[in-house]
Amino acid sequence: MKKWLTMVLVLCMLGTLTACNKPKEEETLEIGYACSTMAHEWYAIIGQGAARRAEDRGVKLTIADPAMDSSKQISYIENFVTQEVDALIVTAVDPSTLGNVTNQAKVAGIPIVCESVALDNQDSYVGIADYEAAYAIGVWMGENAEEDLKVLVVGQPVYEACRNRVQGFLDGLKSTGAPYEVVQEVDGNGAKEDSLTVCTDALTAHPEVNVIFGINDNSATGGMNAYLEQGLDPEKLTVLGFGFEGAVGREALLGDTPYKAAVAMFPEYVGAKIVDAAIDAANGEAQELYQVPTVVITKDNFDQFYIQDEEGNYLTNFDAIDKLLAEQNK
């Protein structure tokens, strides 16, 4: 496997990861990353991207994986403060527990970059615009509709980001004037098996569904599997996902399935941007927001944004994402 993946696997086993092949005397910056977990594919790929960017830019990156344990995350951040890292990246397990320890970092003059979850004392935030990204795939669906749309939404309403995704999708769909009806919205808890269960019940009551929108890859593919297991006609179904986090979404999109499009959030690029943001912050050049671009990805444009290495592993085409970001910022 590509060395970035190997690094992350080592991280998962040992709890920390140092990504830099340059001699110590050449290292100008040391960055600590207190992530939330590397057990989820999204965060594992962020780790790969961060390691890849850190090596490219010649900085030392140490990733500490607390495995969703907030007390461990606090301990790891305390260690980074003691080590006097030049910048700190945090994906908070529980933001309500991090006030004291992140204030320690600020007192020590260590800038803080946040990913996914904002903190009150952050210097920079790296993330996506959920509503706008979902709006785009709603527009895509409306523009590609060939009949009245009977929509099943697989959400996770406990999270604001997921609520924004659902609302953005529906608003984008509505803007096209395509005839549609949301026949039911279910809570799939962001998990494939949970989504399969609740969608099975929904599809029993509403076999007329011909569009399934999921707030992440697992929600979308869980709903798709429920539809297929019901013996309904896959030719009549369009499945739309959000995230395109790794193998789950990629295999569904590239395979012979009703999964036709997804919002790609490029987690490997997120990893690159948190390192860029940390370097900027360490050099006194922090920006408040680093927006990660998104795109509606289909089979037709997949090769534009992903490349395969010699071993067949898919890597994000950073040059293509940089170009996309420049276009979206015009």
Image (cartoon, rainbow, N blue to C red):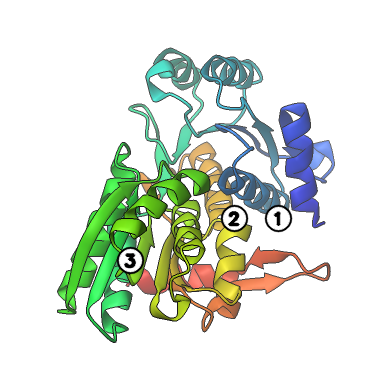
Pointer 2 residue: 268
- Report which quarter residue 14 is drawn in: top right
Under mark 3, the amino acid is: Pro
76 lies left or right of 289: right
C-beta proximity under 8 Å, tags 1 and 3: no
Q: CA distance from mark 2 to mark 3?
A: 37 Å
Name above or below for residue 72 compared with residue 13.
above
- Report which quarter residue 295 is drawn in: bottom left
Q: What percent of the width, then of the height, locates residue 7?
A: 77, 44
State the mark number for residue 56.
1
Between 298 and 71, which is closer to the camera in this rendering?
298
Look at the numbered disc 3 and give the secondary structure of its residue: loop
Q: What percent of the width, then of the height, locates residue 25?
A: 81, 37
Name the front one of labels 1 and 3.
3
Res. 121 in view: yes
Under mark 1, the amino acid is: Asp
Q: What percent of the width, then of the height, locates residue 83?
A: 66, 20
State the mark number for residue 207.
3
